[in-house]
Image (tube, rainbow, N blue to C red):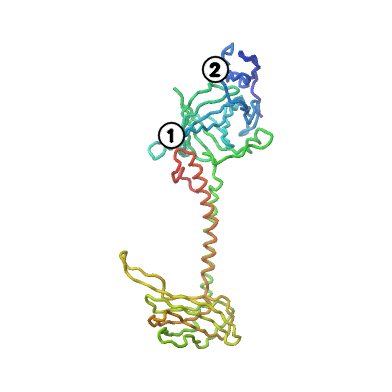
Amino acid sequence: MSAPAQVKALNCPSCGAPLTIRAFEHTLSAVCGNCLSILDTKDPNLQVLQQFKAREGVQPRIPLGTRGKLRGDVYEVVGYQERTITVDDVPYFWSEYLLFNPYKGFRYLTEYQGHWNDVATLRNLPQVDTRGPRPVATLLGEKYYHFQTASATTTYVLGEFPWRVRVGDIAEVRDFVSPPRMLSQEGTEGETVWSLGEYMTGARVWEAFGLPGSPPEAVGVFASQPSPYKGSAKGVWLLCLFLLVALLAVAQAFLAFSRQEQVFRGNYSFSPRSGGEASFVTEVFELKGRPSSVEVGVNTDLANNWAYFRLALINGDTGQAYDFGREVSYYYGRDSDGAWTEGRANDRAVIPTVPAGRYYLRVEPEMDAGASPVRYELTVRRDVPYMGWFWMAAGLLLVPPAFKSLRSVGFERRRWQESDYAGSSSGSGDDE
């Protein structure tokens, strides 16, 4: 474990309250927690650089002097500041905790509405490309997409800092994101600093610093917050593809092993103008083998007309009947958009699991009283696979990945609604 920071005790020249300097020679300014005077620690007399007023009750969530372990090293909280940006006349502020290790130097923890980031300044500067619809920064081969540019004002400070901090300091901040990381550029008069932050949950922060209670609940979606659906949606789609291929193989096996044997075929005609009894029964046919499906097909020569067929497949030995009906309609014509058609002149019905035996069809056609006669053909095939079940299964398999993708798109949309590109369809172009 790294050694703790050196500590030096001083007294505030304004109010006499004791001051504790933890970063020692690295500290350039310190804030008296009693009278909120900002002091020059390099001045032997602790010159007062600024005294400010702040709203009452400002209490950092991580108290000054708290030590915690980040990336395997012990850091101590030595400074705290709040910074504010204003968007559409609405102020938004976030907290920054300055951490110090005498061997590793300084790093930061930032917090906004329960979202935390572990931040360190950079030595290697990223390359920024501004030629596209939005700037892109590249660091060590990774692309970061511009999220927001704003003027950040320091509105509260406490503790000590390795720079001459002042309330009211303004910096131009540009943020670029590649979740879970964020690149930030801060520009002040004559100085530009780049930093790299990585998203942390409040639970990890509380564990690292041994804080009591629970962290504040995160609100909304943060700019660098990793999507809980990224990668998982792709995995679910790959699993779905595998299952669809397996389902297709099963369907092909069903088709290959189905006999699809035609056991009956008959041609008939019906004229609604003739009157009389329309219903009749066909000759008997035999269904052999194991209980399996039966397909009854109706093929007509309908043209701009419709017909309804009440049908029943009846076991001639037991009298068991399978009643069903099929409506057939077919219309065509031409209008200003060209030729059009509607419906079909044929249809079919599949009856599952019909046992073997001697069967016949009872048929009762129906049409408009003044309709033209129709000729039609009835066919019966044994052991025909019903592919509707496979289509239903395929549709159900597509539900989970589609749901995941929708959730992923929604998460990204909420992320970029907080950016300078609110309303755009895509933020970073990440594959989900």
**Does residue 330 appear left or right of residue 97 in this picture?**
left
Looking at the rendered structure, the secondary structure element under dot 1 is strand
Q: Residue at x 42, y 84 (%)?
A: 270
Q: Which residue is drawn at 37% across and 76% down?
A: 303
**Does residue 211 appear left or right of residue 198 in this picture?**
right
- The local crowd at label 2, few if under 14, some if 14 to 19, many if 20 or more residues have their Cα within 10 Å, is some
Q: Are marks 2 and 1 in contact (CB under 8 Å)?
A: no
Residue 345: x %, y % from top left: 41, 75
Residue 57: x %, y % from top left: 62, 27
Mark 2 vs mark 1, CA separation in Å: 37 Å
Q: Which mark is residue 50?
A: 2
Amino acid under disc 2: Gln
Q: Which residue is drawn at 57% across and 79% down?
A: 354
Residue 379: x %, y % from top left: 47, 81
- Asked where in the image residue 3 lies, by quadrant, the reply is top right
Looking at the rendered structure, the secondary structure element under dot 2 is strand
- The local crowd at label 1, few if under 14, some if 14 to 19, many if 20 or more residues have their Cα within 10 Å, is few
Q: Residue at x 55, y 50 (%)?
A: 232
- Which of pointers 2 and 1 indicates the residue nearer the eye? 2
Please give the residue where the numbered disc 1 appears in the rendered image. 127
